Amino acid sequence: MNARHSEPHLALIVEDDRVVRDLAAALLEETPLDVVEVESAEAALECLQECGGEVAMLFADIRLPGSMDGVQLAKATCTLWPTIRVVLTSGAVADELDDLPECVTFMPKPWRGLDVLIQAEKAIHQPQPPVT
């Protein structure tokens, strides 16, 4: 097994807007993280089930197509994979923010590229502590 892959090394981007997803991917590709892109929370859960231990950062929009939104995805991720840094973003700040788990960092859209890179740096060097 490659030593680089013994620790989480993936950034999972969950965004249905192709332009925003491409921008986030371009930023995160400048980090040591490998980037995986999906359009829905359901696709993100499939990816997490396959390689959750390899994911260092989940970067997701709150409003997503399908039956699950980003808040529900964040809750599932925080419960099932508590060491993943979860970052949610949205251009429409609403009541959803009242329901965010403590483990979630929220970044309003339009976000700054530097803020995304800071979160990636934290995901790499300061992973969330596991639940004890």
Image (cartoon, rainbow, N blue to C red):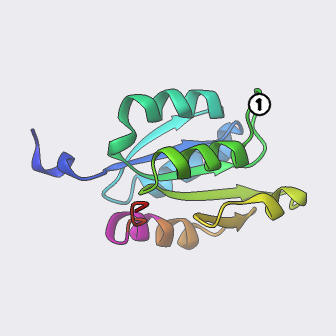
Mark 1 is surrounded, within 10 Å at the Cα level, by few (under 14), some (14 to 19) or many (20 or more) other residues, namely some
Number of numbered callouts drawn: 1
On screen, residue 26 versus residue 69, left or right, reads left
* Residue at 40%, 66% in the rendered image: 129
Dividing the image into 4 quarters, which one contains the C terminus?
A: bottom left
Image point 48% across, 73% down: which residue? 118
Q: Is residue 117 above or below residue 39?
A: below
Going by the numbered disc 1, the residue's amino acid type is Pro
State the image coordinates of residue 107 (x, y, percent, origin top left).
Answer: 68, 66
Residue under the point 70% across and 57% down: 89
| Percent position of residue 42, x then y | 62, 28
Location of residue 67 by image quarter: top right
Q: Is residue 109 left or right of residue 6?
A: right
Expressed as whole percent of the image width and height from the top left, the position of residue 58 reads 52, 50
Q: Is residue 127 magenta?
A: no
Q: Is residue 124 depicted above or below 55 in this figure?
A: below
Q: Is residue 44 left or right of residue 106?
A: left
Q: Which residue is mark 1?
A: 65
Measuring 46% from the left and 35% from the top, which residue is drawn there?
48
Judging depth in this view, the residue of 19 and 128 nearest the camera is: 128
- Reply yes or no: does residue 121 show up in magenta: yes
Q: Is residue 53 left or right of residue 75?
A: left
Residue that sits furthest to the right in the current view: 94
Front-most of residues 106 and 72: 72
- Nearer the observer, 44 or 27: 44
Position in image of residue 76 (x %, y %):
59, 43
Magenta part, dominant SS? helix
Magenta segment = 120-126
Task: Check disc 1 and report its element: helix, strand or loop.
Answer: loop
Question: For residue 52, which quarter of the picture?
Answer: top left
